[in-house]
Amino acid sequence: MKLNRFWVGIVVVLLAGLAFTKIADNEFYFYAIYAVLQLMVMGIAWNILGGFTGYVNFGAGGFFAAGAYTTVFLHKALDGPPLLVAVVVAPIVCGLIGLGIGYLTLRLKGVYFAIATLAVAIILETLVINWEYVGGAGGYYFLIPEKIPFFDSYIEWLFTVILVITLFAIVVSRYLNSSRIGQGLAAIRDDELAAECMGVPTLKLKLISTTVMGALMGMAGAPFPYFITFVEPVSTFSLLIAVNAIAVPMIGGTMTWLGPVVGAIVLGSIQEIVTVSISSELNMLIVGVVLVGFITLAPQGITGVYRDFRDKRRRRK
Amino acid sequence: MSEEILSVKDLTKRFGGFTALDAVNVSLSGRERLGLIGPNGSGKTTLINCISGALVNEQGSVSFKGQEVTGLKASKRARLGIIRSFQIPRPFRSMSIIENLLVPMEYAASERKEHGQLRDQAMEFLELVGLNDRADENSSNLTQIDLRRLELARALSAKPSLLLSDESMAGLSSSEVDEILDILLALNERGVAVIMIEHIMRAVMKFSERIVVLDAGKKIADGSPDEIVNNPDVERAYLGE
Amino acid sequence: MFELFVNAVVAGVLLGGFYAAVALGLSIVFGRLDIVNIAHPAFVIIGSYVAFIMNERYMLDPILSSLIFLPVFFLLGVGMYRLYYVCFERTGQESLSGLAYFFGIMFIIEVLLILYYGVDYRNVQAPYIGETLFLGFLGLPYRMLVPFITAAILTGLVYLYLSKTFLGRAILAVSQDRLALQLMGANPVRVKQWAFGIGIATAAVAGALLIIIQPIEPSVGRLYIGRVFAIVILGGMGSISGTFFAALIIGIAESLVATFIGPSWAPAVAFGLLLVTLAVRPQGLFGRAG
């Protein structure tokens, strides 16, 4: 019955989202919620390798930007194809990048993998800065189509796309978490040597985890050029994206698919409020401080704290 | 006398300039109980690591059930039926006791799955070691003896044909040692060959049908417990010249 | 053409020497203590800003001000390690959370610097900056030569300290055998604290050298992450001499790429070398035993 409850929830959220596009009159809501959902996908993706498997990725910005620039490339090469083409191609490209990094470094200690992810992000950024075809350092302008069927404005369409991507990410994450693969990933996270000796094919599962993470991050980045309309390397490869991707599961909880969802809503809301009312630099400071605060004081995140609280109550009975 | 299940031939393992194992030969028949002893640093754990696949040997070969396994990953060997327990227990800390057992059941023993609920089968193994009434407790805060029990139960649930037990009794009281011994003997009754590394002599003598002695990476003796006890080379290795 | 090549190599050597100063602290902390302080370059940038402020307000030479502030940086390092130890090492969580912790610290430092000083480039004034020493066709700008010499001296001092003094050798030992260290009467936690303090103290000097060589702004530190980790790993994790030579190699490689391909490709060189090293020979060129 729990399975059905989940799927019903997914469908309800999707329908509510669609309804929202018809009801809401202020476009600002769509921009704000888009940002939160983008955070959510990045956090869910990061958590698959980070929380489920125990390997840290510092280069989330690289995967995200790779997805965005795949869209830019396709836009230029195929003369403005529909967004959905990019949404399908970007995860393939980014999944392969993830697989590549994993293959190079996952036989080594987790530390080297983490550093390698940062290295790849900077190398990709340098490549893009020097690549005039996609705009190079100067950037690339995106023209949004005037009319779009079924929706009143393009942002409503983008909102729907990112909503579907988010729900997809949640479904994938939940599947990985609760399946046999999830047990293997958790074993790798808890004790990789013991997992290997208990028959878990650790390298294979780590590669799967890295590839899925890369693909989902690429998916999150694919609609970004349409959202931001001007794509340039520095802000697209921004370190803030990488920090957010880590902060979201750290705040919400790393053990299940629900953690990043909670974390994205909390962090996303804080960021929206601070950026709008005070400044974007202060927003970055707050994200950093919140991240370090949760890592040192509450590494199990909000959902983890709740779970501990609930277990304590149960034990007292 | 059952057929040969494990054959280690001329196994050599080096760490940089240091030779940990030097052309070691060991064979084991199915259901046999082999004790592996030797002074500290003689290479016992290294040998276990090479057999289980945690380390790769430079020279020599390891065959299991007639199949060459040298060079195979540890997870592959585990799926074939070579299972090891660790000297210092390594539980999966985020999981409950019974969840710890589900991992090897899903992976190492995946080709040896029986019908029925995995959880019920896991409970049987927990009963064997006496942890069944705490199946859903988290595994991170257990006492030493409970950790050892869990380590063995987890190894059991991988449905091994060969169990490599690395000092599973170190630091336990006399009655706890007997308890672990009983579990290992029961396991052997079910048809599992066991190689036991142990320093507690009375356990080794009671348990082993045959004993292999290592010293400084070389095998210096291989025989019945009585033969080993009366072997002057063994005495010299432990007590010095 | 030949002259261009030789000048590029020599410039690379000078640059590499400076890189060694930046990587020195990480060589101790990551190479020896296995603490992944990814925020090390951020501390170097703090050192640069300290030198900048002292230079702007009091006309102090940057290297001099870094020496004055050495104790402050040392204590800062001790404090950072204590926090890291209490939250992570003690509970055995180093891997995931420890990495993210330093990543967060690095980010906070960068953002604080942006908040206080903005994103404008800053530099320092000193009598030797802007002058060049000419040896035949070789041009040695003083703003590169002085940091190189300082870096070499610093490296030499650290090398001597680690191999000759009791505390220095304790640092070398603590990663290899905690128990033996304790039996010798040294507290491993204190030794690590001391080592981390030294690591951050070197960042103060490296920061001063950095702002002599080039103008800085808060995000410059990020470019150095790849360089320092590439140097430490290539140099063999904790070998001080290995670090120095690896730094020279990276410096020369970057200089050649900048001269013959283009300066905008330079940041990728170190990271690229890092990836290649990780893929092909993770123990580095001068790998440490064990």
Image (spheres, coloured by chain):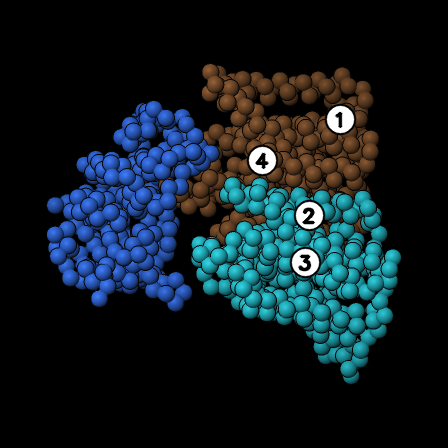
Chain colours: A brown, B blue, C cyan
The answer to the question of whether label 3 and label 2 lie on touching residues, with beta carbons closer than 8 A, is no
Q: Residues within 10 Å of mark 4 (few under 14, many from 20)?
A: many
Determine the image quadrant of residue B78: top left
User: Disc 1 marks which residue?
Assistant: A30
Three-letter code for the amino acid on which mark 1 is drawn: Phe
User: Disc 4 marks which residue?
Assistant: A299
User: Disc 3 marks which residue?
Assistant: C201
Mark with earlier residue (3, 2): 2
Q: CA distance from mark 1 to mark 3?
A: 49 Å
| In this view, A176 is above or below C172 | above
Of circles 4 and 1, which is in front? 4
| In this view, B204 is above or below A154 | below
Q: Residues within 10 Å of mark 3 (few under 14, many from 20)?
A: many
Three-letter code for the amino acid on which mark 2 is drawn: Met
> What's the chain of the residue with tag 4?
A
Q: CA distance from mark 4 to mark 1?
A: 32 Å
Of circles 1 and 3, which is in front? 3
Residue at image location 65% in from the left, 65% down from the top: C20
Determine the image quadrant of residue B116: top left
